[in-house]
Each structure stands twice: as C-alpha cells, then as structure tokens.
Image (cartoon, rainbow, N blue to C red):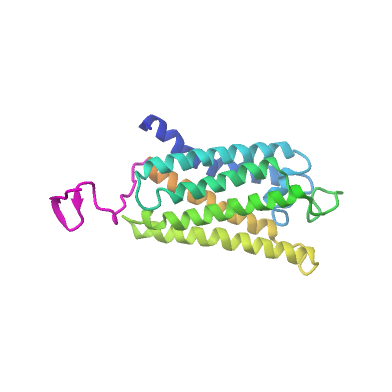
C-alpha cells in the first residue's frame, strides 16, 4: 500500500467522525416528532426521511472499514495492529447492518406507529451492540500503542473507551425506565448520542495523529535484527 493510498484511508476515519454526527443531529433537529433528548439515533432510520439515515449509516460503515484498513497498514505490525483494525471492522459492519435493517418504532417515534419487537428490530440491536462494543474495545486495545510516546494518548483512549460503553449502557437503562413509565421522557436519546460523539471524536483524533505521521512504534518488540538489550545484530 503506497502513501498515496494510505492517506485517503486514514482520512476516511476523520470523514466518518465529522459527517455522521453532523447529518444525524441536523436531521434530528429538523425531523417532525423526533427529540434528540428522547429518541435514539437509530430511530432516524424509520419514519420520514428514513432513507437519509440509511445512506448515512451505510456510507459511514464503509468509511470506517476503510479507516480500519489504513490503520492496519499505518501501525506496521506490533501491539494493536491486528485487533485494533478487527474491532473497528466489527464496528463498521455494525453500522452497515444497522443502516440496512431498521429498528422498531419506539418511545412514540415514528408518530402513530405502535411499538413492538420484530426480527428486524432484534437484528438491529445486535448490529448496534457490535458498533458500540467494537468502538469501545478498539479504544482500549490501541491505548497502549498510541500512548507509547505520550501518556496523554493512553489516558484519553482509555477514557474514550470507558465513556462509549458507559453512555451506551446508560441509554439502555433510560430507555427501559421510560418504557416502564418510571421516567418520562428519559434522556435515552441524549445518552446514546453522547456515546456516539465520544467514539467519533476518538476516531477523528486518531486519524489526525496518523495522518501527521505520528505513528508510535511498538516499543515492546525489538527492532528487526536487534536485541532489546544490545545494539549488536542478533542471529535468527
């Protein structure tokens, strides 16, 4: 893979981090009956203008998959170079499936449609889990590699991975409380959007760092032909 090819792949991570939330929030803020506080991002894949978010999720998933391929090449092997891209690829697959298979009506959206659980909704839930779990796990897996030259990167990656999954679980709890009538309207949508925002911001930061050429070496692996404790060549 040449540098000319690598740069667009890494840039796709920045693109998905900017384009997806922008389109989600712009559509959500102008969609009749939809509340960014109350309804999850997936609800925008139903009702009026559902086609817009179908495109957003599918294109976003493909961009994330391209970024995973670029990340694999940029890390040049070593710690995180295998599982980091695999986990991001899992998140990308989740995005594509979530776009192609819509969720069920819920929390009064789309207006006038009864809530219920269908096969489509269950598949969408599995895809959503792959998205959030993949992004969170990738941040943890890459934390040490990205933090090889700067402890701040390790801290920020661990924090991002934690917030992604914490906000996602909190959104699920808020949703459940709302459906039980214990808290209405619960901020299930806000919490889910915060989880996505954390993941997108992390992707942008990693993409920018890699594009600037700040690719940390895996310091735990001796250089080719070198012993970690000696400058003399080591026979294989």
Confirm whether the magenta stretch covers residue 217.
Answer: yes
Residue 155 is situated, as x and y percent measured from the top left of the image, at 41, 61
Total marks shown come to 0
Left/right placement of residue 97 relative to residue 66 reads right
Left/right placement of residue 32 relative to residue 197 reads right
Nearer the observer, 50 or 145: 145
> Does residue 219 sit above or below 210 in this rendering?
below
Nearer the observer, 44 or 117: 117
Left/right placement of residue 83 relative to residue 40 reads left
At 49% across and 47% down in the image, what residue appears? 86
Secondary structure that dominates the magenta span: loop
> Does residue 167 sit above or below 98 in this rendering?
below
Residue 169 is situated, as x and y percent measured from the top left of the image, at 63, 63
Q: Quadrant of residue 182?
A: bottom right
Q: Is residue 21 visible?
A: no
Q: Is residue 63 visible?
A: yes
At 69% across and 61% down in the image, what residue appears? 187
Location of the N terminus by quadrant is: top left
Residue 76 is situated, as x and y percent measured from the top left of the image, at 34, 43
Left/right placement of residue 35 relative to residue 22 reads right
> Does residue 67 sit above or below 174 in this rendering?
above
| Residue range (magenta) | 212-236
At 45% across and 50% down in the image, what residue appears? 84
Nearer the observer, 59 or 123: 123
Confirm whether the magenta stretch covers residue 60.
Answer: no
């Amino acid at each position: 893979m040449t540098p000319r090819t690598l740069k667009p792949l890494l840039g796709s991570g920045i693109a998905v981090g900017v384009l997806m939330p922008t389109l989600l929030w712009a559509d959500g803020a102008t969609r009749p009956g939809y509340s960014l506080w109350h309804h999850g991002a997936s609800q925008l894949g139903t009702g009026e203008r559902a086609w817009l978010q179908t495109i957003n999720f599918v294109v976003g998933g493909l961009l994330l998959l391209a970024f995973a391929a670029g990340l694999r090449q940029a890390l040049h092997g070593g710690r995180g170079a295998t599982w980091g891209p695999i986990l991001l690829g899992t998140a990308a697959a989740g995005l594509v499936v979530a776009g192609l298979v819509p969720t069920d009506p819920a929390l009064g959206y789309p207006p006038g449609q009864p809530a219920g659980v269908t096969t489509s909704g269950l598949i969408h839930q599995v895809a959503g889990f792959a998205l959030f779990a993949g992004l969170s796990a990738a941040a943890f897996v890459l934390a040490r590699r990205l933090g090889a030259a700067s402890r701040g990167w390790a801290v920020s990656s661990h924090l991002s991975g934690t917030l992604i999954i914490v906000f996602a679980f909190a959104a699920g709890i808020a949703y459940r409380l709302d459906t039980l009538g214990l808290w209405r309207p619960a901020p299930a949508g806000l919490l889910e959007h915060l989880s996505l925002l954390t993941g997108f911001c992390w992707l942008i930061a990693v993409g920018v760092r890699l594009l600037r050429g700040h690719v940390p070496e895996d310091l735990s692996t001796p250089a080719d032909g070198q012993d970690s404790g000696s400058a003399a060549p080591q026979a294989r």
